[in-house]
Each structure stands twice: as C-alpha cells, then as structure tokens.
Amino acid sequence: MATTVTAPTASPANRPQALAVPPGTPPVVEVKGLWSVFGKGSEAFAVHQDLEFTVQRGEMLSLVGGSGTGKTVLLRQILGLARPARGTVTVLGRPASEMGRAGAASRVGMLFQHGALFSAFNVLDNVAFALREQGTLPDELVRDAALVKLQMVGLKPEHASRMPADLSGGMVKRVALARALIMDPPLLLLDEPTAGLDPNSADEFCALLRELHAALGLTVVMVTHDLDTLFALSTRVAVLADKKVIVTGPPTEVARVKHPFIEHFFMGERGQRAMAPLAGVPGQPAAAPTTQTSKDA
Ligand SMILES: Nc1ncnc2c1ncn2[C@@H]1O[C@H](COP(=O)(O)OP(=O)(O)OP(=O)(O)O)[C@@H](O)[C@H]1O
C-alpha cells in the first residue's frame, strides 16, 4: 500500500502542469503486484515486492529512491526489456513484455543516461535508426523525418552529418532525444536526463523537455537524482523505498512527508536550494500535507 498525498489547491505558474485529459482516460502505465527478483536459490533477493503505481496520460512522473531501489529495473520493465518475477506492467493497455522491439519504439521512447548513441553512425543515422530498421518507408522520407526531429530538439540540418564524438554533452542529449522521438511514441522514459550537463545546459534541456511535453502531449516517466531537474519537470513524484512505491504526489508535497529517505533527499542543502524559488508562491500550502491511504498510488 502506498500513501497518496493530496494535490495542492492551486498550482503556481512556474510548476510543470499535467496535460488535461478527459475523465476515465485509461492510464498509460499500470504496474500491479510487481515482484522483481534476482539471483537463485539462497542467493535470491527481491528488489521490488508487490510494488504498485500508475501513470496517467499527460503526467511527468519522477521516480526517486536510494541507490539500488530498482528505478532502472522498473524503467527496463516498462520498456519491455525485463520481465518481472510476478505481477504485471501494462503500457498503453498491453503487457510491456509483449511489445517486441519495433512495437516498443512506436509506443515508448527511451532517453538513456549517457545518450547511448551509436559511435560509428552520424547524427542523422542515429536519429533515423528505429524508423529505418522498420523498413516501411523509402530512405528519403526516413531522412526527412529524422531532420524534422532534429529541428524539434533545437539542432540544425548541418549537425546531421556530425559524429557523436564531435558533439557537446548537451547536443548528445538532444540527438538522443530526437532518436527516442523518431517513431512519435506517446510515452517517453528518461534516465537521469540532465546527468553530466552543466547547470545552463541542464536548464535548457529541461525547458526543451517541458516544451515537447506540452506540444506533443507526451506522458513522461523519469528517474532523476537531481532536485533542480525534479522540480523543473515533475508534475508528480513517486518514491521507491522498502521495495515499494511508498508515496506519490506533487513534489513540494512529497518533500514534506516524514520518511528517512525523503527527509535526506529533500531536506539537504541541495533540496533546500531547489525548493527556495517555490517558497511563498501563492497556492503553495505552508503546512505539512494531509495524507491519505490508497491502494493505487
Ligand atoms: N540483471 C541483473 N542481475 C542481477 N541483479 C540485478 C540485475 N539488474 C539489477 N540488479 C540489481 O537490482 C538492484 C536495483 O538495481 P537498479 O539499477 O534498478 O537500481 P537503481 O535504483 O537504478 O540504482 P541507482 O540509483 O544507483 O542507479 C541492484 O541491487 C542491482 O544490483
């Protein structure tokens, strides 16, 4: 069972907003009764035990938790790259493990932590990869689609022929993002989207992600340890601890929940700095949040 924190009564303008969706819209991601177990026999250990959470269309949900709590395992399960020992991971109404590689690319885009570009391919061929591999479009159209995606992430046609080794960290992230979006997936997974970027590039990349979220109507699930990124991008936060999702809610509300990991994560110097701009914003309740228990976080 997880605790769901009630949403604040009003949202300040500088917080990311979940997109409006009609009531009754089915969730994009639904994780139920999930067990993830590694090792065999007496060596076996569970990373997740009966973990549950859902992601609604148009949300930007951050998964946070200590090292080894299984955030990356969860992203891999949503992507269909790993099967749970027990329980279900449903993406857009279908079991994630049944999507297959081509199906996954058109339903879920993944931005890996360090970009994971193919070093032997130039920018255009990296971006075009999944579409070209599908083999349904003539190469000219594949190239045009890749150029459109490059423009969408703020890169120019002249960047198309560059090799990954010749790109700045911020450009690698943008190319990797264009590649993740080549098949127009409705769901985007981000693993530490701003890791390795300087503060300015990180801010610019967050601004781009927010623009694309709104413009393309994306649903986003991300893992981040960076509090500036978390506050810049999250409409909701889910905290992994004790092998479960223990709480979900808007970031400023979750930050007030009494739990050793949450206090350590949000109340350190970095957390205080990241939250400072939000202090005193109209609509931000000053008191501790009321909490309620619900089965579905
Ligand atoms: N294929 C695997 N085989 C064995 N153990 C694994 C495998 N994949 C993950 N694990 C284990 O599962 C646990 C969770 O790993 P995971 O990488 O998901 O953690 P995380 O929350 O992403 O951590 P971090 O924040 O440090 O990146 C770790 O103990 C890891 O060693």
Image (cartoon, rainbow, N blue to C red):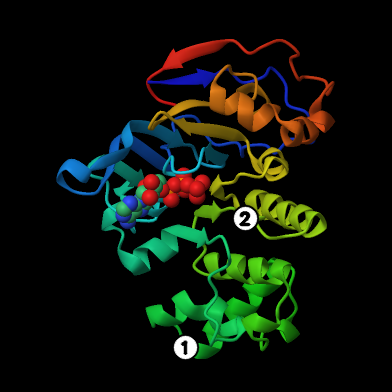
Q: Is residue 146 left or right of residue 242?
A: right
Quadrant in which the C terminus appears: top left
Residue wearing tag 2: 193
- Give whichever of 121, 186 is nearer the camera: 121
Residue at image x 68%, y 60%? 196
Q: Quadrant of residue 106?
A: bottom left
Q: Disc number at residue 188?
A: none
Residue wearing tag 1: 138
- Give whichever of 284, 59 is nearer the camera: 284
Residue at image x 59%, y 68%? 176
Q: Quadrant of residue 42?
A: top left
Query: Which numbered mark, 1 or 2, is in the foreground of this view?
Result: 2
Amino acid type, residue under disc 1 in the picture: Pro
Q: Is residue 68 left or right of residue 192?
A: left
> In x, y percent, where is residue 208?
72, 57
Relative vertical location of residue 43 with respect to residue 111 in this rendering, above or below = above
